[in-house]
Amino acid sequence: MSIRITCINKSGGFHADPHHAIQNLGWVNEDTKATGKNTRLEIYNWIKKGGHAYVRDSRANVATVDTREHFNGTKYVQTRADGVFTDNLLALPECL
């Protein structure tokens, strides 16, 4: 199954890495039209188990969502385009 991440919710407080500020991610399965919202850790674990997530920007460019782990052990997700980690998730609107 593949999902497109459509929005994010950021948690409050200080974050040494802006990707740690992402608390929830909203998504849509474009094949089934199913939608949902999951925590950062739930999406992280789902991708680790073989799920595929991506982000599409306003110009229809696609960036894959990949798993990362901060040196302090925090697990998070970040987009990767052409082998380079990017900030496409942070550019998404807030989920309602």
Image (cartoon, rainbow, N blue to C red):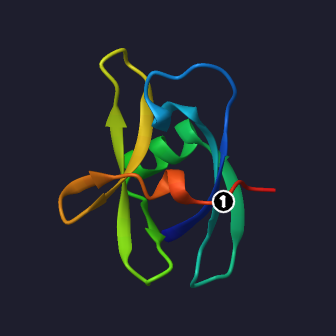
54 w.r.t. 69: above or below? below
Say how many tags the image has. 1
Q: Nearer the viewer, residue 53 or 80?
A: 80
User: Residue, x 44% and y 59% (percent of image)?
Assistant: 88
73 w.r.t. 26: above or below? above
User: Residue, x 46% and y 43% (percent of image)?
Assistant: 44
Horizontal side of 60 relative to 25 (left or right) equals: left
Q: Residue furthest left?
A: 83
11 w.r.t. 25: above or below? above
Q: What residue type is disc 1 on?
A: Pro
Rendered location of residue 58, percent (x, y): 50, 79
The local crowd at label 1, few if under 14, some if 14 to 19, many if 20 or more residues have their Cα within 10 Å, is few
64 w.r.t. 72: above or below? below
Query: The C terminus lies in which quarter of the figure?
Result: bottom right
Q: Which residue is mark 1?
A: 93
Horizontal side of 6 relative to 61 (left or right) equals: right
